[in-house]
């Protein structure tokens, strides 16, 4: 199934996508679970393109990211794949390509000051450790953090807006798309 990494979330979700013989990507297909209306899903993952039914057959697979980035294609040898055991196809090279893409995205983002990064790591560890021992205390801490985050984000968004940075620049700094950056800025500026 798909891959994701924080803090990029849905902006950089990845899959092992299908590539047709002509080098193009097939349109996503709907897979119906058969247990009622609306129980299926759309996918572009390679394993959905076996050539059965009205679906085309993938000639290759490659990493595909929600941001539009694509990795290099790796041929699929259908003569060596048991169609009942599609999970046997080694997709590790595609995953490695996607991880390299994520590393590139990460390098382009604005770096956190080391002291802040360490504080966030310690906070993360403390909250997870306490979640099982003192869950109400963790919920109180989360509530406090939500208020702090709203206020600080509002202040920082106004400073970024005053700097006149473009959605593209903000998106690159945060590792998200320009549209997502605009949406976040609007949320930070006007929804306190």
Image (cartoon, rainbow, N blue to C red):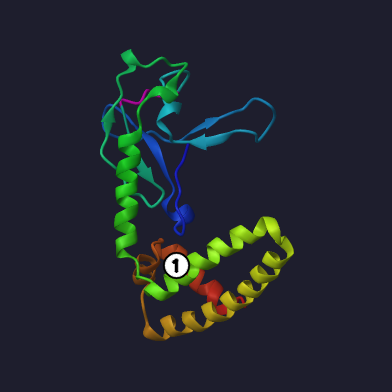
Name the outermost residue toward the right.
136
Tell me the quarter of the picture where residue 78 sits: top left
The residue that appears at 60% across and 33% down in the rendered structure is 40
Q: Is residue 188 left or right of residue 96?
A: right
The residue that appears at 69% across and 27% down in the rendered structure is 35
Q: Is residue 100 left or right of residue 54?
A: left
Residue 168, compared with residue 48, is above or below; it is below
Question: Magenta stretch containing residue 56, yes or no?
Answer: yes
Q: Quadrant of the C terminus?
A: bottom right
Dot 1 alpha-carbon crowd within 10 angstroms: few under 14, some 14 to 19, many 20 or more: many
The residue that appears at 41% across and 86% down in the rendered structure is 162
Can you identify the residue that label 1 sits on? Answer: 181
Q: Which segment did they paint magenta? A: 55-59
Residue 61 in the image: state x and y as whole percent.
Answer: 33, 32
The residue that appears at 26% across and 29% down in the rendered structure is 22
Circle 1 SS class: helix
Main SS type for the magenta part? loop
Tell me the quarter of the picture where residue 168 sits: bottom left
Residue 100 in the image: state x and y as whole percent.
Answer: 29, 49
Residue 147, compared with residue 27, is above or below; it is below
Q: Is residue 66 left or right of residue 189?
A: left
Residue 118, compared with residue 106, is above or below; it is below
Residue 26 in the image: state x and y as whole percent.
Answer: 38, 33
Residue 80 in the image: state x and y as whole percent.
Answer: 33, 14
For this rendering, which residue is in front, 99 or 17?
99
Total numbered labels placed on residues in the image: 1
């Amino acid at each position: 199934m798909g891959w994701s990494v924080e803090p990029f979330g849905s902006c950089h979700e990845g899959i092992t996508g299908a590539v047709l013989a002509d080098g193009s990507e097939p349109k996503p297909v709907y897979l119906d679970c058969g247990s009622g209306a609306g129980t299926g899903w759309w996918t572009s993952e390679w394993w959905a393109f076996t050539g059965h039914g009205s679906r085309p057959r993938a000639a290759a697979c490659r990493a595909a990211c929600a941001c539009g980035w694509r990795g290099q294609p790796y041929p699929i040898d259908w003569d060596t794949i048991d169609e009942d055991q599609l999970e046997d196809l080694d997709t590790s090279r595609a995953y490695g390509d996607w991880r390299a893409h994520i590393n590139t995205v990460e390098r382009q983002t604005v770096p956190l000051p080391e002291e802040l990064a360490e504080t966030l790591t310690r906070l993360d560890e403390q909250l997870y450790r306490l979640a099982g021992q003192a869950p109400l205390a963790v919920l109180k801490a989360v509530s406090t953090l939500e208020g702090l985050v709203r206020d600080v984000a509002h202040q920082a968004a106004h400073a970024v807006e005053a700097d006149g940075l473009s959605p593209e620049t903000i998106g690159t700094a945060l590792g998200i798309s320009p549209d997502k950056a605009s949406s976040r800025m609007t949320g930070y500026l006007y929804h306190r």
